[in-house]
Every structure is written in structure tokens, then in C-alpha cells.
């Protein structure tokens, strides 16, 4: 097992640049998730790792083996497809054994290994079925089995759960993690679902418009986003953003949103924004609701979404609609409230570049 | 709609059955009931058994050539990166071009005096006489063999191979790309992908196409008649040609219909056997 | 994990183990790829040549004088050999009649096939009736009918009913032959159109026929075009039925008519036939170029 390095990967389709300046190292046994909105280039990147697309520029190394120009056949990767791609004309057993057959293993060896894998995935009773007879979750298990029997050097997942229902996703998530830990190879997992990314990954790569926006652990991205894009992409409910201004007060700088001001602790870059507009972000979890309408941003309650352990509440304010996570049992009843963000949790971004002001 | 179809498809068969039990001179249609006499006569005819043999040869030969060429062409077109549209236009042209024009071109190209193909073959020493006429090959162990039948098979295949091509191409297009990608990830070579993905997916369609081609070629009347009128002698007289010749040249309408009925039975039995053995429609469904 | 590592004790590096025993026999990837590419390009050139050469030969000889053709093989009509006179054959009364007849019969067949297949296909797709499956099998059986097996009985039937030597008679016969495929294709195609779309039209107050016309019909365009093309190919091509059902020289269509000329006439030479052949090839050529995706779609329905 080895590290996987990508150096300056770039992919153009005609005049369209799909991916550029992609640098990443995935360690042995590390689970890295590539996340971003559709069209951000994450699937193209994964296909370059798999060899299904050839990089226009840049290098790809598996350990010290340069695989940049190798076809997928010679890369020793495993790939789990979004649409599963089991062969309908083969039994589950033969589907799983296919990679071993190609590698030239004798039939008894192949089947023995398939049985072992099937045992691990708890699909032994399905081995003699045809893929068409299986449910979506079972199919994806089989596909997982097919990918893992061959001891890959790199495990790739291309949105493998986007067509499955929520409960199946929760069942499969730990399975994917266990399996990749067992195999111990580097893993690259592509998804557009930030929740999947947060729950499964050692590290997350957020992509935006063909470029890496930020790389980091789940908490790091959540607490310390580098840009407004990352901040709003990661976390549920979405980070609330406002148009604000930086103003100078007697005891330091403050951020002004609407008619309210919140002091902010001194940040190195902030001074130069004085009297200039700025983007202010705060997570719904970090806004408190008070009955006192002058105690914060005035908001008229619209509706509640009870989630059991907490409630998502929506308010109409002069600054637009605001989502707040309120305690269990909260019912706004359409009255007016004051919304007060915790000033230590404010994230400030440059209004033009969207980059974080630290 | 059922009615029209029944009218034109069922009625003639019944009519043929009925007519085949009569002696009917074509010029003055007076029906004389003769029972099974026509059938007895059919099975006694030397030319019937000869035509059956030649018809089978024509059918098997044509189907094999068409299968090989058609499949080859489909795979090539499917793989081509450039000029795909050009080649497939040629393919569809030869599918839609009237048979009579293929015949005209073939007659012209094989003309013993001005035909380009005739001269090409003659200069290689492949033949001397008219290919669709007197030319023969002396095969060791078999003796003199007329070139007319093989020539008709090849000319027919020029037009009809593309049927297989189009059939296979449609099937090839319907194989999702992700199957190939999954196989590539497993390390499969192009040959292995062909063997393990393309061929199994194509099998059903190929079986169907082979069935249809066999039936069509066994029934083939137009191109043979246009090229040779069944000649020289009876060298290219297959079953449909024989039925036509007996009816209109021999003026024996009842006999002609008897041959038609026999043909139909022969095909029906063959087709049922084929369906039982391979069950192509089920293959196609999956 | 013990399951996957059980051959850990074996010799060789991890990579060798992973790649298995089979990969060592192979040619290297670049070699395989260039062999494959060479094979594809070579095959394409060869097949293209085989397909195109007869057409080229027809086309170039359509522009040659009779003298030039009789002088033997030449590759292009240059200099004195070039002429447009050959196309004058269309003014030959007989040939003009044949072509007109062919056009009438073809148009009639295409219209009839499209109309009937639409109605029948819709009926099969949307109504359940007894014997539906049997009917489907029966459609399949339609393939086994040899044109000759149909045409011989039809000859006398048409003779009695006065349809012999009429365009209608031939149109009916040709439609019957195209029908199994056309109905099947339309049936399968309409099945792919969700019934909910029609149902929403009914709920909006449209009667059944309005639903069919407004919702189903527009979506069947590809199948209609495919059916029309197949019917065109059949009718434009047909020789057997026309020869038997249209024996009269005035009524017959192009294929049997031209064959009579070939076998009987010494006034017309190969150049003339090539010229008229070229003219008759132009419609199929245009269809093939512009409508090939529809043809392919027709086959994709895998209408058996």
C-alpha cells in the first residue's frame, strides 16, 4: 500500500477547463472525500485518478509509480460507480469474480475469494442471483464486493449512494468505511452530499469551479472555512450570510448589519476594511432568539421544522430570510423576535473574492 | 386493422392451400380438384429436390457471409473515431437502395465485354466465361461447379449484410459505457471486454438477426430472378424461383401453390425448432 | 483482514500478487492499442471501399458515352467520353411511367402503413383484449411469409376482384408485408410513453381521441419516421409483388419495368441504366444521410 500523489492535474474538454491546479496527497489508509456542487469538476478529477480520462497536464503518482499516462487497466484501482454497472448477463458470483478472471486466476481460487468477500459483506445468499433480481442496496453491496476482491492500490467511489434512499445510505456508510479501512489503501470518495462527506472522511476536499477551495478535516472545514463558498457548502442548515459593514468604535472594530453592531475581536486583516462593505456569516446554531426585538436583528417568525432533538426556525428580517436552530419544543407562533448571533462565531469574508478575513 | 392484416396474410395462405389441391392451367383458369396429386408431383420432381438443395445452400451461404461481414462492419463502425457518419451513410444507402439497381450495377460490372469486375477476375485467372452464366470452377473432389450461385450469394450479401450491421449497431449503442469502464478498472483488455460484455449482450440480437436473415434469404426471390432468372439451366433456381417458374413458365398454378405451401411448412418447422432451441425473444428481453 | 490477505505467505511483491498470474502473457498496452487502431482503420477503409466502389462505378459510368463504355474499363468520364445524354432515358415514355408508378405506390404504402400502425400500435399498447399475446406471436409469424408465398395466391384473388394491375392492389399487398414490423415497432414505442401523460389530458377534459392526437401522436414522431422509412425501403425496393401483381407494362413499377428493358431492349445500353439507377439512388442516399438515426432507433426497439 502506498501514498497517492496528484500534482497540478488539469483537464480541458476543448476550450472548457474542467479541472485545474489540482494538488493532493492521499495517505495509506486515508479516506478523502471530494465534495462540491454539480459541475465543479469532482467527477472529472476522480475519472483522472481512475484513468478513464487522461489528464491534459499534471502528474499522478501511485507511490513512486507514475501512472499519469497509464490506461485504467494497468492502474490497479477499484471504482464503485454511481449507477452500479453490474453486468446483467452474469450472476452475482461471476460479476464479483470478473476482475480475478481478468487477472488470470483459476476458477476455484476466484470463487473461494468471492465467497470470502461475500461473507464479509453479508451477501452470500445472493451469489447465484442475477443483478436484476437485487434491490438497489444489495446491488451496491455486490458492486462493492466486485471492486474489493482485487486488492486495489487506490479505492475510488463515484457518488455510489446518490441513487439510494436515506436509510440505505446510513447502512452503507459505515460499511464503506470499514471495508476501506480493512483493505488499507488510499480512498477517494466523490459526493455532492456534504453530510456524507462530513460523516465518512478523514479529510475533505471542497471543490468549486474546477479548483480546490479548501482541504481539511471535517471539523476544520466546519469551524474554520477559508471562504464563503466553503462556509455555506459545509454544515446543515446552511451558514447564514449578511451584507455588513466594518465600523470603528471606541474600543475597537465592530461589524454592522442593518441597524445592529457586534464588536469583533481584533483580526489582522480587518482594519483595512474599515467603513467598507463586508460579508458576514454565522451558523444557524450560533444565533440565539430573544423575545426582546431590540436585542438583535428584528425578525418575524415564519415557520418551524421540528426535528425531534432541535427545531429549525425561519424568520423574515430586513436582511432577508434567516434560519435559526432553536431548542426542542420551540414554537414561534408568528411573533416578532430579536436574533442575536454570538459575536465570537462571526465569520467575515471579502465581498469580492469571498475569501475569509482572518 | 386486424381485419386488413388477416385479409392479406391469412387469406392467401388458405387460398394457396386450397388452390394447391387443384389443377389450374393459368391461361384458362378452370379448377379441377385433384386432391394431393400436386404434392405427389412436387415431391417427385427432380427440380424440386434440386431447388431445395440449392435454396438451402443459398440460405446458409448468404447468412454466414452476411453475419460475418455485417458483424465486422458494425464493430468497426462502433469503434471508429472519424468518418463514422460517412461509412454508416454507405451502410444505410445499401440498405435502402433498390435491389434492381444493385442488379443493374452487378450485371454491368460482370459483363463479359465491358465489366470491370469480370475483367479483374479474368486477369487474375479466376474465371473465363460469364460469371452469372457459363463460368465454372473445377474443384478437386467435387468436379465442375457453376460460379453463378456463389456470385448471386456475394452480390446479395453486398446489399443485405448491412441488415446485420444495423441490427448489431443498434444493440451495441444500447450497451452503457459504464460497463466498459467497470471492466477497464478490472484490467480487462479490449478483447476481454468484447468477449465478456459485448458478445453476451449482442448474442440475443445476433440470434434474432440470423433467424430473420435465414428466413429472408430462403424466401429471396427478387435478386436471384433479376440476376439470372434461375439460370443458367436450373443452377440458381431456389424454391421461390421454382414456384414462380412452375406457375408462370409451366403455367401450372396449382402446382406453384403446392410448392409455396411446402416452402411455408418447411420454414415454419425450421423457425419453431429454432425458437425452441435458442428462445431468441427471451434473450432479447433481458 | 484475514479474508483478503490469506495469500500473504506467497512470494512476490504486492503488485505482482494483485495483478494475478494472467497479466504477464500480455502484449504491452501501447502495442495492443496500435494494433487495434490499425485494425479498425484498415477494416474501415476496406469495407468503405467495398461498399462505395459499385456506387462510384454506377455514378461515373452514368456520365459516359456509349462508345466510351464499349471501349472498356476506364476510371473517369473525361474529355470526349463525358456526356449528359444518358439522363435523357427519363424522357423515354416507358421509364417515365415506371418511375411515376413507383412513386405513387411508394407514397400510398408509406401513408397506409403509418396510419394503420399508429392505430394498431396504440390499440395494442393501451387496450387489453383477449388473445393479445397470441396476436403478438401472430405478428411475429408474419415474418415467415415469403413474398412469393403471398404473391402467388394474391395473383388470382386480385384477378377476380379486379385489383390486378391496379396501384391499390399493390399498395395493399405491400402494406400487409410491412405491417407486422411497423405495428410491432409502434406498439413497443407507445408503451414507452407514460400513460399518465394521457390520463392528465383526460382529466383536463379531453376525450380519448384528443388525448391520442395531442399527447401521444407528437411523441411518436421518431417511430413514425422509422416506420415510414422502412415502408419506403420496402415499396421503393419491391420487385416480387410488382412483377406478379402488375403484369401490364403500363401499370408496373420501376424495378420489374427496368428489368424488362434490360432483358428485351437493345436500344438502351448500360450507360442509360446507370443514369437512371443513379437517379433512383438519390432519394435513399439522402434518407440514409439525414435520417439514419431514426432507422437505427427503429432497430433499437428490437422489434422482432
Image (spheres, helix red, strand yellow):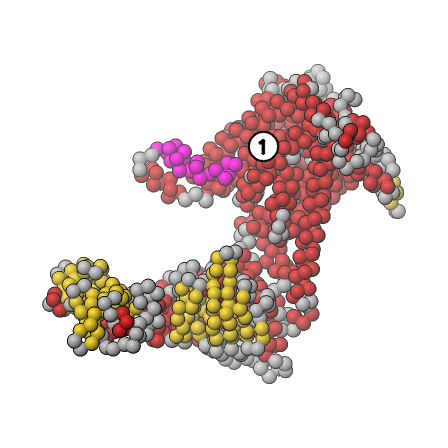
Q: Quadrant of residue A240?
A: bottom left
Q: Residue at x 72, y 24 (%)?
A: C85
| Secondary element at image label 1 | helix
Q: Is residue A18 magenta?
A: no
Picture coordinates of residue C60, whole percent (x, y):
72, 34
x 44%, y 73%: residue:
A32
Q: Quick check: B111 above or below A46? A: above
Stretch of the chain drawn in magenta:
C207-225
Residue at image mark 1: C232
Q: Is residue A338 left or right of residue C186?
A: left
Residue C212 part of the magenta segment: yes
* Residue C294: x %, y % from top left: 54, 41
Residue drawn 69% across and 25% down?
C87
Percent x, y of residue B58: 74, 40
| Residue A323 position (above or below residue B267) | below
- The chain ID associated with circle 1 is C
**Quadrant that contains the C terminus of chain A:** bottom left
Q: Quadrant of residue B222?
A: top right
- Classify residue B166 by image quadrant: top right
Which of the pair A301/B106 is nearer the observer? A301
Instruction: Give the tally of numbered discs.
Output: 1
SS majority, magenta: helix
- Toward the bottom, the furthest residue is C9
State whether residue A323 is above or below residue C235. below
Residue C67 can be seen, yes or no: yes
Amino acid at each position: 500500500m502506498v501514498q497517492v500523489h496528484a500534482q497540478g492535474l488539469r483537464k480541458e474538454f476543448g476550450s472548457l477547463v474542467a479541472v485545474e491546479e489540482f494538488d493532493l496527497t492521499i495517505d495509506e489508509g486515508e479516506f478523502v472525500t471530494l465534495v462540491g456542487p454539480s459541475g465543479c469538476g469532482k467527477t472529472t478529477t476522480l475519472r483522472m485518478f481512475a484513468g478513464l480520462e487522461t489528464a491534459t497536464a499534471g502528474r499522478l503518482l501511485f507511490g513512486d509509480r507514475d501512472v499519469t499516462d497509464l490506461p485504467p487497466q494497468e492502474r490497479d484501482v477499484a471504482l464503485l460507480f454511481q449507477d452500479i454497472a453490474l453486468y446483467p448477463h452474469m450472476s452475482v458470483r461471476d460479476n464479483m469474480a470478473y476482475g480475478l478472471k481478468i487477472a488470470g486466476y483459476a476458477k476455484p481460487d476466484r470463487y473461494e475469494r468471492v465467497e470470502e468477500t461475500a461473507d464479509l459483506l453479508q451477501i452470500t445468499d445472493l451469489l447465484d442471483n442475477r443483478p436484476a433480481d437485487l434491490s438497489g442496496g444489495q446491488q451496491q453491496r455486490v458492486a462493492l464486493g466486485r471492486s474489493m476482491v482485487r486488492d486495489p492500490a487506490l479505492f475510488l467511489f463515484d457518488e455510489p449512494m446518490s441513487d439510494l434512499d436515506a436509510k440505505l445510505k446510513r447502512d452503507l456508510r459505515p460499511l464503506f468505511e470499514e471495508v476501506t479501512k480493512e483493505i488499507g489503501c488510499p480512498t477517494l470518495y466523490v459526493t455532492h452530499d456534504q453530510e456524507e462527506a462530513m460523516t465518512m472522511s478523514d479529510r475533505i476536499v471542497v471543490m468549486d469551479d474546477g479548483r480546490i477551495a479548501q482541504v481539511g478535516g471535517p471539523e476544520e472545514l466546519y469551524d474554520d472555512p477559508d471562504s464563503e463558498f466553503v462556509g455555506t457548502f459545509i454544515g446543515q442548515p446552511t451558514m447564514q450570510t449578511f451584507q455588513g459593514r466594518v465600523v470603528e468604535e471606541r474600543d475597537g472594530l465592530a461589524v454592522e448589519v442593518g441597524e445592529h453592531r457586534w464588536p469583533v475581536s481584533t483580526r489582522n486583516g480587518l482594519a483595512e476594511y474599515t467603513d467598507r462593505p463586508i460579508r458576514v456569516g454565522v451558523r444557524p446554531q450560533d444565533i440565539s432568539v430573544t423575545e426582546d426585538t431590540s436585542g438583535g436583528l428584528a425578525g418575524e417568525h415564519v415557520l418551524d421544522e421540528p426535528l425531534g432533538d432541535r427545531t429549525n426556525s425561519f424568520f423574515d428580517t430586513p436582511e432577508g430570510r434567516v434560519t435559526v436552530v432553536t431548542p426542542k419544543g420551540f414554537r414561534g407562533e408568528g411573533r416578532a423576535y430579536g436574533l442575536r448571533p454570538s459575536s465570537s462565531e462571526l465569520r467575515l469574508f471579502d465581498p469580492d473574492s469571498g475569501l475569509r478575513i482572518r | 386493422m386486424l381485419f386488413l392484416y388477416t385479409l392479406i396474410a391469412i387469406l392467401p395462405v388458405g387460398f394457396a392451400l386450397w388452390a394447391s389441391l387443384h389443377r389450374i392451367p393459368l391461361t384458362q383458369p378452370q379448377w379441377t380438384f385433384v386432391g394431393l396429386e400436386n404434392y405427389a408431383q412436387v415431391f417427385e420432381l427432380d427440380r424440386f429436390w434440386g431447388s431445395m438443395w440449392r435454396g438451402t445452400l443459398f440460405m446458409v451461404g448468404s447468412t454466414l457471409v452476411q453475419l460475418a461481414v455485417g458483424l465486422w462492419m458494425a464493430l468497426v463502425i462502433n469503434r471508429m473515431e472519424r468518418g463514422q457518419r460517412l461509412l454508416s451513410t454507405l451502410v444505410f444507402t445499401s440498405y435502402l437502395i433498390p435491389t434492381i439497381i444493385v442488379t443493374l450495377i452487378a450485371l454491368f460490372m460482370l459483363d463479359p465485354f465491358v465489366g470491370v469486375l469480370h475483367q479483374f477476375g479474368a486477369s487474375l485467372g479466376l474465371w473465363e466465361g460469364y460469371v452469372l452464366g457459363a463460368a465454372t470452377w473445377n474443384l478437386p473432389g467435387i468436379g465442375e461447379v457453376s460460379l453463378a450461385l456463389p456470385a448471386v450469394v456475394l452480390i446479395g450479401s453486398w446489399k443485405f449484410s448491412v441488415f446485420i450491421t444495423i441490427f448489431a449497431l443498434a444493440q451495441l449503442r444500447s450497451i452503457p459505457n459504464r460497463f466498459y469502464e467497470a471492466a477497464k478498472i478490472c484490467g480487462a483488455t479490449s478483447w476481454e471486454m468484447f468477449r465478456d460484455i459485448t458478445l453476451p449482450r449482442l448474442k440475443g440480437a445476433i440470434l434474432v438477426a440470423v433467424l430473420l436473415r435465414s428466413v429472408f434469404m430462403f424466401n429471396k426471390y427478387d435478386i436471384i430472378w433479376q440476376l439470372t432468372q434461375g439460370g443458367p439451366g436450373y443452377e440458381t433456381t431456389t424454391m421461390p424461383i421454382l414456384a414462380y417458374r412452375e406457375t408462370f413458365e409451366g403455367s401450372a398454378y396449382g402446382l406453384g401453390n403446392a410448392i409455396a405451401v411446402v416452402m411455408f411448412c418447411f420454414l415454419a418447422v425450421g423457425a419453431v425448432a429454432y425458437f425452441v432451441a435458442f428462445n431468441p425473444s427471451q434473450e432479447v428481453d433481458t | 483482514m484475514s479474508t483478503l490477505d490469506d495469500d500473504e505467505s506467497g512470494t512476490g511483491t504486492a503488485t505482482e500478487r494483485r495483478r494475478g498470474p494472467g497479466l504477464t502473457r500480455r502484449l504491452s498496452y501501447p502495442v495492443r492499442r496500435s494494433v487495434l487502431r490499425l485494425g479498425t482503420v484498415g477494416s474501415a477503409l476496406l469495407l468503405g471501399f467495398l461498399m462505395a466502389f459499385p456506387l462510384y462505378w454506377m455514378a461515373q459510368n452514368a456520365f459516359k458515352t456509349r462508345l466510351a463504355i464499349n471501349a472498356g474499363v476506364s476510371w473517369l468520364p473525361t474529355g470526349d467520353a463525358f456526356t449528359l445524354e444518358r439522363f435523357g432515358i427519363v424522357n423515354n415514355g416507358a421509364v417515365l411511367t415506371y418511375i411515376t408508378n413507383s412513386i405513387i405506390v411508394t407514397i400510398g404504402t408509406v401513408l397506409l402503413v403509418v396510419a394503420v400502425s399508429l392505430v394498431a400500435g396504440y390499440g395494442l399498447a393501451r387496450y387489453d383484449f383477449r388473445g393479445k399475446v397470441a396476436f403478438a406471436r401472430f405478428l411475429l409469424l408474419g415474418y415467415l411469409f415469403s413474398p412469393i408465398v403471398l404473391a402467388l395466391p394474391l395473383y388470382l384473388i386480385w384477378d377476380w376482384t379486379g385489383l390486378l394491375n391496379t396501384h391499390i392492389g399493390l399498395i395493399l399487398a405491400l402494406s400487409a408485408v410491412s405491417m407486422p414490423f411497423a405495428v410491432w415497432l409502434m406498439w413497443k414505442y407507445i408503451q414507452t410513453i407514460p400513460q399518465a401523460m394521457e390520463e392528465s389530458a383526460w382529466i383536463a377534459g379531453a376525450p380519448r381521441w384528443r388525448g391520442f392526437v395531442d399527447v401521444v401522436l407528437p411523441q411518436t414522431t421518431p417511430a413514425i419516421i422509422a416506420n415510414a422509412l422502412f415502408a419506403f425501403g420496402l415499396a421503393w425496393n419491391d420487385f416480387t409483388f410488382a412483377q406478379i401483381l402488375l403484369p401490364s407494362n403500363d401499370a408496373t413499377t420501376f424495378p420489374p419495368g427496368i428489368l424488362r428493358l434490360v432483358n428485351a431492349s437493345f436500344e438502351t445500353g448500360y450507360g442509360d441504366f446507370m443514369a437512371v439507377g443513379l437517379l433512383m439512388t438519390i432519394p435513399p442516399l439522402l434518407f440514409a444521410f439525414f435520417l439514419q438515426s431514426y432507422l437505427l432507433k427503429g432497430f433499437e426497439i428490437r422489434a422482432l
